Amino acid sequence: MPDFHLETERLIIRNWTEEDRELFHLINSDEKVMEFFPFRRTREASDKMMNDLKTGIQREGYGFTALELKKTGECIGFCGLANAHFEDGLEDAGVEIGWRLAPQFWGKGYVTEASLKLLDFGFNTLGLDEIISFAVKDNQNSFAVMERIGMKRVPSRDFYHPLVPNTHPHLKPHLFYSLQNPNKKGG
């Protein structure tokens, strides 16, 4: 399968490269970026995750892909589509859209821009019926993005994340958002 590549006005959405490792570790270990996660990744764990994402993108044709600024060639984080399934609960919940950027790139509209392109790819290329997203109940910034890209809250699908340890009870409640494919009848 050819490597993943999409473009927006300001961004290249692509698979990971060796040059991205430092930034990938930064966003997975930074206190501000990982505020709503119960852990911070070591360099070794971050490298393994990036390798897994890269392989998954090559195998599936999509995944949590790198975001590169066209103007500078700099990797700023990720945004992508991935199969949402957990070891316990939410089995095969669907395809989710998710993101994570280095703090210096927050508030510039990059996630919204990339997400809109990825939604188009998911609905029009992959033919998905629905794309979902979810976040810790206090993560207002993520909910704002979800709403900007047209997603709607589905309170009946809110859940307690099964992979969040009991040592972090405040991070267990997650709010659920969904967007139906606008090109399909009944969507």
Image: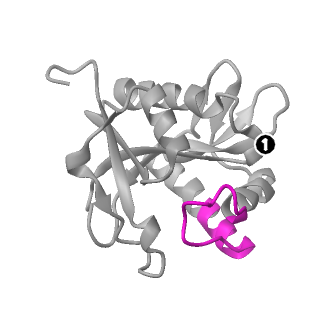
Camera-side residue of 94 and 175: 175
Residue in the image at 67% along x and 67% along y: 46
Please tell me whether residue 35 belongs to the stretch shown in magenta: yes
Image location (x, y in percent) of residue 121: 44, 28
Q: Residue furthest bottom?
A: 167
Q: How is the image coloured?
A: one colour
Residue in the image at 66% along x and 71% along y: 41
Reading the image, the residue beneath label 1 is 104
Please tell me whether residue 43 belongs to the stretch shown in magenta: yes
Camera-side residue of 167 and 57: 167
**Residue 80 visible in the snapshot:** no
Image location (x, y in percent) of residue 111: 60, 34
Image location (x, y in percent) of residue 79: 57, 42
Image location (x, y in percent) of residue 69: 76, 31
Task: Please state if 26 lies on the left or on the right of 160 as rendered.
Answer: right
Q: Secondary structure at mark 1?
A: helix
Q: Residue furthest right?
A: 72
Query: How many numbered marks appear?
Result: 1
Number of residues whose C-alpha sits closer than 10 Å to that of mark 1, classed few (under 14), some (14–19) or many (20 or more): few
Residue in the image at 25% along x and 46% along y: 155
Q: Mark 1 is on which residue type? A: Gln
Q: Is residue 53 above or below residue 94?
A: below
**Residue 178 visible in the snapshot:** yes
Q: Is residue 131 above or below residue 31?
A: above
Quadrant of the rendering where the C terminus is positioned: top left
Residue span colored magenta:
29-50
